Image: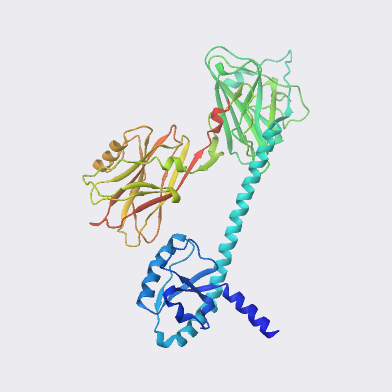
Amino acid sequence: MQELMSSGIAQRMAAKKLVAASDRDRSCFEGSDIEHLVVYLDASGRPQATLQNAFPLIAVAFSDEGEADLQEQLALLGSLGTVPTVPVQRLDPAKKSESFTLLRALTEGGVGRLARYSASITSELAILRRERETLLENYRALEDAFQARNWEPVSEIFSHDPYADPKDEGIEQLLATAFVEQLLPVSSLGVAGLALHLHTVPKVSGELVVALSYLESGEGVAEWTVPYAQLVPNWNFFSLPRACGGAARTLRLRVSATGPETVGLSLGYSIAGERYSARSELPHPDLDLRPLAFKVFTGLPGVKPASAPNMIAPSSLLEGQYIVDYRLAVDTLSQIVDVSVTPIVPEFQTVRFLEHEHAVVCHPLPSGISAGAISRAVEPGTISFSASAVIDHPEGQPAAVSFLLAPANSNARSEVAELARKGAAKPSAFFSGWREVNSQQAVNINIQLEEPLRGPMDLMILSRAVTDSVDYSWLKVFGFRLVKQSTESADVR
């Protein structure tokens, strides 16, 4: 029994490789009490793509050749991104026994436990990534199932039919001088749009303004500003880009109009409750326990509703209610072109795309500005742009980095030249300002806009020297993240 227990302990410990050594020094470790803790790096073979069951805390060498091999192999391990920098310790072969005792105490003590804990976190992270991929696949399968069965993602759940009372005066002038409000008698969860009934539509110029907001917080959802020419004397459907999600709240509808003649907004039959009656800031006899004539449609929360005849998309999304993140696709980043403004002709490529890292390299030169441009990279509606930058070489000299957004299809080299000459961008462009970056820690650079972009913009990544030397100054920009107001509703019509 004791032998079996000893064997089990040895097997568990053998799975934890915490000491790295060169294959040239293998004979020094054979037969020692830390042999089960050593992972050997073979300099004569191909570089290892992964380390199985290993998390080296220290590298040990007994010879000059072994130390040189370790330095070379450990540099390659840095690309894995999961193993921290491993220190190399040179030991005296004559004092192996004492050294091995200290090494075993180090690796199997508190530091060893911490290493095992880190290894378990890495393993759990890999499991979470697989679970996330499975979840996304399930969502995709669910969407495919809806499409295969031709299920409608939008359905009518509430309706107030229009009713014309002979005594009605009409609320047309009320729409022009004030507004009419209506609480929707349904939860906001899943609401994908609504319809209003118009009994007359003038042929002269003017606009109907419809706004939807949350009663509890006053937060805006969407606003529709629709010319009369786009309206019909019947039901007019106002869609949202995605069905409302989040907590269930109360929706408030507000309608007004502009122009010399106003649209005929229909009212419904009288109801018993005052809460869901139409109201205005000005008294009007037609609004005595009468709601607007409207319909409410719901769908899957967060899902774009299906199109319908005469469907009207929002002209604006209020207070950032529909804010979405997006990232620059690989195909977009790969289109970067060199637009540097510098008198120096380098012997190497200063601007290039790193496909496997989804990053861009923009190497500064001793004078002028190195720059890469990506045409129409930034989408309309964008309100924020950010990315990270670092000098991708341990001995690389520091540099300065910045971003420039210019109108689509502008002369990128001219935009960079203007910045180099005046130190400021053109009025039509947006400049992030210069940030110094080194090889020690990545920095984040961002552009925050006061209002969403009205059209697509070209992105330019700029770099310049901050010292007399640009040796190994491989400036890498990665992690492009953009935030925009959703414009998916623009093509719902």
Left or right position of 2 against 42? right
- Height in image: 462 above or below 162? below
Left or right position of 403 against 219? left
**Numbered disc total:** 0
Where residue 183 sits: x, y (%)? 68, 32
From the viewer's side, name the closer residue of 54 and 433.
54
Where residue 428 sits: x, y (%)? 35, 34
From the viewer's side, name the closer residue of 381 and 254.
381
Where residue 163 sits: x, y (%)? 73, 18
- Height in image: 199 above or below 59? above
Image quadrant where one finds the C terminus: top right
Left or right position of 216 against 488? right
Residue at 60 percent of width and 38 percent of height: 218
Q: Outermost residue toward the front?
A: 44
- Height in image: 274 above or below 369? above
The structure's colour scheme is: rainbow
Q: Outermost residue toward the right?
A: 272
From the viewer's side, name the closer residue of 183 and 25.
25
Q: Picture quarter containing residue 392?
A: bottom left
Image quadrant where one finds the N terminus: bottom right
For residue 281, say whether it is visible.
no
For residue 266, say whether it is visible.
yes
Where residue 411 sits: x, y (%)? 31, 34
